[in-house]
Image (cartoon, rainbow, N blue to C red):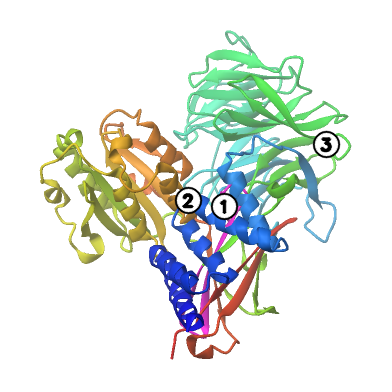
């Protein structure tokens, strides 16, 4: 009888799990274990449900106990190591040992014939551009280095293109070194405009090399022959030059790579062997690297205060890749490639953590990866199995790097599916929701006395959000009071006058944790992007917690791929708890009184790529009338990296 009860509750638990009802799953698994506590499979799935519910420590305790009983469980051991690394706060500051894992030779016909590559640029959606100076073309490749497009400049052709940058709108800008101009092209490579004719006058060019856009859309170009950097608007209108002959404070000798931050323009000088810093108005601020650098060429922005610098001696006798941290005024050697290459000109990180570099003299594209332990692996999870239309099966597969960042741009060729140890030869592949696609948005309004005084502003923000929603968006409005409640849902047509829903008197007592937990729970059953926006005066402390800790909330959101954003109506210096949750879930803080206000707020909330891919196939296994446990496995591979996950499900009972 105990066996029957245990099996019955285990089936209910696994079905609840795959529907995203993790709290119910925990209860069923615990009940199953109360009848048969020795069954390891039930204990594993209890831990999995705890993990998805945000109770990571309890989940890891259960998994460690299972691993002690059976140390041969490699997948479980790998999962625990990944989670321990993420929870331990390890970051990519550590173990930065990068080695070449693959080389593509442009002179070999089995790939694609290209000569003298001068620049490599990654695009965050999983593509990258290779500029071939010697063969006069720009090549667009996917994440598996398959050639997607080749741009040659139409009838007139490109005249030794040197660098390429893509705007958020999809336009492509190409610097033509011998053409002494910049070409603006559509996303399919058709030239639509040129600017910067040959000459020494304002805005003219002699040998333009590297380029960079700033956050406001201004384009900066290293004007090599004129020994300066030119600034243009996106239409090509000249704004100013910096570092030219006779410039106050600093003059270039051989300007090369450029990166632009919110407040600074950072330019490499390969002849002076230094990095120069300017403000946006062209005023020289400082320089770094004198006596340290060999000959800096291309640069690419990493994040925060970090820049990737490709450093090569003039004749290629020495070459390396550095990371510049300008706030610390330090350089870290990521990889010395003197014995591996001739002359590197540019390097960049791809969206999936690998590093690309181009060897100008040897006509090669190099792929580098961190080979230290788990940093070379892929975290894979089968998040959900939809067997409601059995034998048609859909797997929601998560693919992330070791630090929890989504792997983007993967294709069907990167996945393998096995059912009961038999390969599934034919499966349907669905990419994650793209930027701009439909989302599940939970808007949580803090029920505090301070925020209650801003009723008019709240009303304006909510009206703006509702007016910006896309046709397939679903917005859930939640009130964060003592007992959080769902006030309205847009798919029910109830959010017409949102401000009218918030006229109840505000109180000082509200429970942040309960409201945030409710918001996340409303989003999990859906496959759309999951976003929570918290409307607040900016302050949360321990008095606003009742049932869940901050760590539990962060784990709950991260493990279910929910992005947490804050819209503050007070100061943007929000409390530490809110800032932590924003950082851990890759969200952002917005201010109602920012210059742009709440215009395009919905668009701003949609800036994070999803890590969930969907694989569909027809099961060949007997369903066992819904009582047979069916096993499935998936593997994800990318270059020299791979990861694997197993799961199980029950077909519908019949």
Q: Secondary structure at mark 1?
A: loop
Q: Is residue 371 left or right of residue 388?
A: right
Q: Residue at x 56, y 54 (%)?
A: 60
Q: Residue at x 41, y 48 (%)?
A: 553
Q: Is residue 288 magenta?
A: no
Residue 631: give x, y in percent of width and height: 60, 77
Q: Secondary structure at mark 3?
A: loop
Mark 3 and mark 1: span between their CA atoms?
A: 36 Å
- Whether residue 599 appears in this view of the structure is no
From what the image shows, is residue 150 above or below residue 366? below
Q: Are marks 3 and 1 in contact (CB under 8 Å)?
A: no
Q: Which one is in front in this view, the residue at disc 2 or the one at disc 3?
A: 2
- Residue annotated with mark 3: 337
Residue 643: give x, y in percent of width and height: 67, 60
Nearest the camera: 319 or 108?
Answer: 319
Specify start and end residues of the magenta stretch as a single range. 384-409
Disc 3 crowd, CA 10 A, few/some/many (<14, 14-19, 20+):
some
From what the image shows, is residue 396 above or below residue 6? above
Specify the label residue 146 is tagged with. Answer: none
Q: Is residue 404 magenta?
A: yes
From what the image shows, is residue 387 above or below residue 310? below
Instruction: Tally the marks.
Output: 3
- Residue annotated with mark 2: 558
Nearest the camera: 327 or 296?
Answer: 327
Q: Are marks 1 and 2 in contact (CB under 8 Å)?
A: no
Q: Give whichever of discs 3 and 1 has the lower sequence position.
A: 1
Disc 2 crowd, CA 10 A, few/some/many (<14, 14-19, 20+):
some
Q: Is residue 364 left or right of residue 580?
A: right
């Amino acid at each position: 009888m105990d066996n029957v009860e245990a099996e019955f509750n285990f089936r209910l638990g696994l079905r609840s799990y795959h529907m995203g009802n993790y709290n119910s799953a925990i209860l069923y698994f615990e009940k199953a274990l109360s009848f048969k506590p020795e069954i390891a499979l039930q204990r594993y799935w209890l831990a999995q449900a705890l993990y998805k519910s945000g109770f990571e420590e309890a989940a890891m305790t259960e998994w460690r106990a299972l691993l002690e009983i059976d140390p041969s469980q490699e997948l479980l051991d790998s999962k625990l190591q990944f989670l321990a690394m993420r929870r331990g706060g390890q970051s990519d500051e550590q173990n930065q040992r990068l080695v070449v894992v693959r080389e593509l030779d442009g002179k070999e016909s089995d790939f694609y014939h290209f000569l003298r590559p001068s620049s490599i640029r990654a695009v965050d959606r999983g593509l990258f551009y290779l500029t071939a100076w010697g063969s006069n073309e720009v090549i667009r490749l996917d994440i598996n280095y398959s050639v997607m497009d080749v741009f040659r400049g139409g009838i007139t052709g490109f005249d030794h293109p040197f660098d390429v940058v893509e705007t958020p709108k999809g336009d492509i800008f190409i610097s033509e070194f011998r053409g002494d101009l910049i070409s603006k092209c559509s996303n399919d490579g058709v030239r639509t405009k040129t600017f910067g004719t040959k000459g020494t006058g304002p805005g003219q060019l002699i040998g333009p090399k590297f380029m960079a856009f700033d956050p406001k859309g201004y384009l900066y170009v290293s004007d090599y022959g004129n020994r300066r950097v030119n600034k243009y608007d996106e239409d090509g209108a000249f704004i100013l030059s910096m570092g030219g002959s006779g410039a106050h404070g600093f003059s270039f000798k051989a300007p090369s790579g450029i990166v632009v931050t919110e407040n600074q323009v950072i330019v490499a000088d390969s002849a002076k062997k230094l990095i120069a810093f300017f403000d946006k108005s062209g005023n020289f601020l400082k320089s770094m690297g004198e006596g340290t650098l060999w000959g800096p060429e291309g640069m690419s922005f990493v994040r925060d205060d970090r820049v990737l610098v490709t450093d090569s001696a003039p004749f290629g006798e020495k070459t390396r890749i550095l990371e510049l941290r300008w706030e610390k005024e330090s350089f870290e050697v990521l990889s010395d490639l003197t014995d591996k290459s001739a002359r590197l000109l540019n390097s960049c990180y791809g969206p999936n953590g690998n590093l690309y570099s181009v060897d100008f003299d040897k006509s090669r594209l190099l792929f580098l990866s961190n080979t230290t332990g788990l940093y070379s692996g892929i975290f894979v999870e089968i998040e959900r199995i939809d067997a409601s239309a059995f034998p048609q099966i859909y797997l929601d597969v998560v693919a992330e790097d070791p630090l929890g960042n989504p792997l983007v741009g993967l294709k069907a060729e990167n996945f393998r599916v096995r059912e009961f140890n038999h390969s599934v030869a034919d499966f349907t592949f669905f990419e994650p929701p793209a930027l701009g696609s439909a989302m599940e948005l939970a808007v949580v309004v803090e029920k505090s006395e301070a925020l209650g005084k801003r009723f008019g502003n709240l009303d304006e923000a909510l009206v703006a959000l509702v007016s910006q929603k896309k046709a397939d968006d679903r917005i859930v409005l939640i009130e964060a009071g003592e007992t959080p409640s769902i006030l309205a849902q847009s798919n029910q047509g109830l959010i017409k006058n949102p401000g009218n829903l918030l006229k109840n008197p505000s109180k000082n007592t509200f429970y942040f944790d309960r409201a945030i937990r409710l918001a996340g729970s409303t989003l999990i059953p859906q496959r759309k992007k999951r976003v929570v926006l918290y409307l607040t005066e900016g302050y949360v402390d321990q008095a606003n917690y009742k049932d869940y800790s901050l760590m539990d909330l962060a784990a709950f959101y991260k493990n279910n791929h929910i992005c947490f954003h804050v819209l503050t109506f007070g100061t943007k210096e929000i409390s530490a708890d809110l800032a932590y949750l924003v950082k851990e879930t890759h969200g952002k803080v917005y201010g109602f009184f920012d210059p742009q206000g709440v215009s395009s707020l919905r668009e701003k909330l949609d800036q994070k790529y999803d890590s969930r891919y969907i694989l569909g196939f027809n099961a060949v296994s007997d369903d066992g009338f819904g009582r047979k446990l069916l096993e499935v496995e998936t593997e994800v591979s990318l270059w020299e990296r791979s990861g694997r996950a197993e799961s199980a499900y029950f077909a519908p009972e019949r």
